[in-house]
């Protein structure tokens, strides 16, 4: 169900505003199909942008990493953060170089990260993250032990201030360029999983799980 969202002055799109999508469910669909985000923050006056995996539960985004990492050390102090997720759907080749583009879906989230202290929420967040990337894997794997949990930090970012941007469709050329003699169109792109490759030390009696044989990022 559509959930219209009123953007803030920081998230309202100005350039190419017609591509803005101010709908919470549409943003969630993009987040749920992706699994890699880029986290931007400033530490000691220096901007950093770090790629990391994530998971979502309702209006919260969870990220995790080593408790000793620069990103986790800084973000748990509730510094402002910018998180972006982008799905690339196609290359749009126009007749003029200037009008080349891409078809894509993206979400930008602004906010502050909070350290997850509650052990139950922390473990559930790690489960959500695992299931977001490979549904079915959590119950099929050894669970984290106390040492691993202690060495890992989990942060929660509220999906309160956000914007989504989408570009779909064909080439848009200047009218005078439609007669230019070159190929124009769209090269579709998608993420496709290959056949799973057994680990060299895998017990030969263990078969490939169905959730890997049928793995896809399409939701």
Image (cartoon, helix red, strand yellow):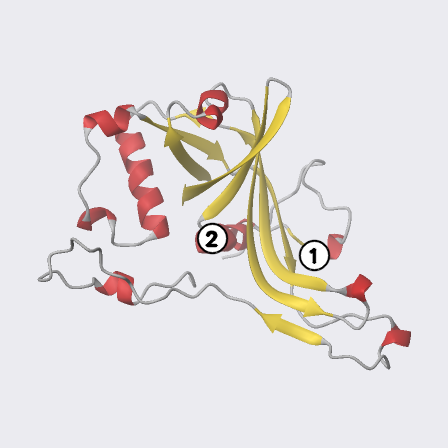
- Tag shown at residue 29: none
Residue at the spot of label 1? 19
* Left or right side of 35 for 9: right
Q: CA distance from mark 2 to mark 1?
A: 19 Å
Secondary structure beneath label 2: loop
Is 218 on the left-hand or right-hand side of 150? right
Indicate whether 123 appears above or below 175. above
Eyeballing the image, is 50 above or below 25? above
Q: Is residue 201 above or below residue 119?
A: below
- Quarter of the rendering containing residue 105: bottom right
Indicate the position of residue 64 as horizontal and vertical percent values: 39, 34
Q: Quadrant of the C terminus?
A: bottom left
* Above-or-below relation of 183 to 37: below
Q: Nearer the viewer, residue 172 or 194?
A: 194
The answer, for residue 57, to whether it is visible in the render is: no
Where does the image place residue 77, in percent across and percent down from the top left?
49, 18
Crowd around label 1: few <14 · some 14–19 · many ≥20 (10 Å): some
In front: 140, or 27? Answer: 140
Q: Earlier in the sequence, mark 2 or mark 1?
A: 1
Would you name the residue on which mark 2 appears? 34
> Mark 2 or mark 1, which is nearer to you?
2
Residue 23: give x, y in percent of width and height.
Answer: 58, 51
Residue in view at x 78 percent, y 49 percent: 15
Q: Decide: marks 2, 1 in contact (CB < 8 A)?
A: no
Q: Quadrant of residue 111?
A: top right
Image point (87%, 75%), residue name: 177
Q: Which residue is farthest right? A: 176
Q: Position of residue 68 (x, y in %)?
A: 39, 22
Secondary element under disc 1, as helix, strand or loop, is: helix
**Would you call the spot at circle 2 few (<14 residues within 10 Å), some (14-19), or many (20 or more)?**
many
């Amino acid at each position: 169900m559509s959930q219209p969202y009123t953007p803030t002055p920081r998230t309202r799109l100005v350039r190419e505003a017609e591509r803005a999508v101010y709908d919470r469910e549409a943003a969630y669909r993009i987040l749920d199909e992706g699994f890699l985000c880029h986290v931007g923050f400033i530490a000691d006056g220096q901007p950093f942008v770090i790629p990391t995996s994530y998971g979502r539960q309702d209006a919260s985004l969870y990220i995790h990493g080593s408790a000793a990492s620069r990103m986790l050390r800084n973000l748990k102090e509730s510094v402002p953060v910018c998180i972006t997720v982008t799905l690339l759907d196609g290359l749009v080749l126009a007749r003029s170089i200037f009008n080349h583009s891409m078809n894509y879906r993206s979400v930008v989230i602004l906010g502050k990260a909070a350290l997850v202290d509650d052990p139950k929420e922390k473990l559930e967040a790690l489960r959500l993250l695992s299931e977001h990337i490979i549904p079915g894997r959590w119950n099929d794997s050894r669970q984290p032990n106390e040492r691993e949990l202690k060495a890992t930090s989990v942060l929660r970012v509220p999906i309160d201030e956000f914007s989504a941007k989408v570009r779909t469709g064909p080439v848009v050329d200047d009218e005078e360029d439609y007669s230019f003699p070159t190929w124009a169109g769209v090269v579709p792109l998608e993420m496709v999983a290959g056949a799973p490759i057994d680990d060299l030390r895998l017990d030969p009696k263990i078969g490939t799980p169905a959730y890997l044989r049928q793995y896809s990022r399409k939701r």
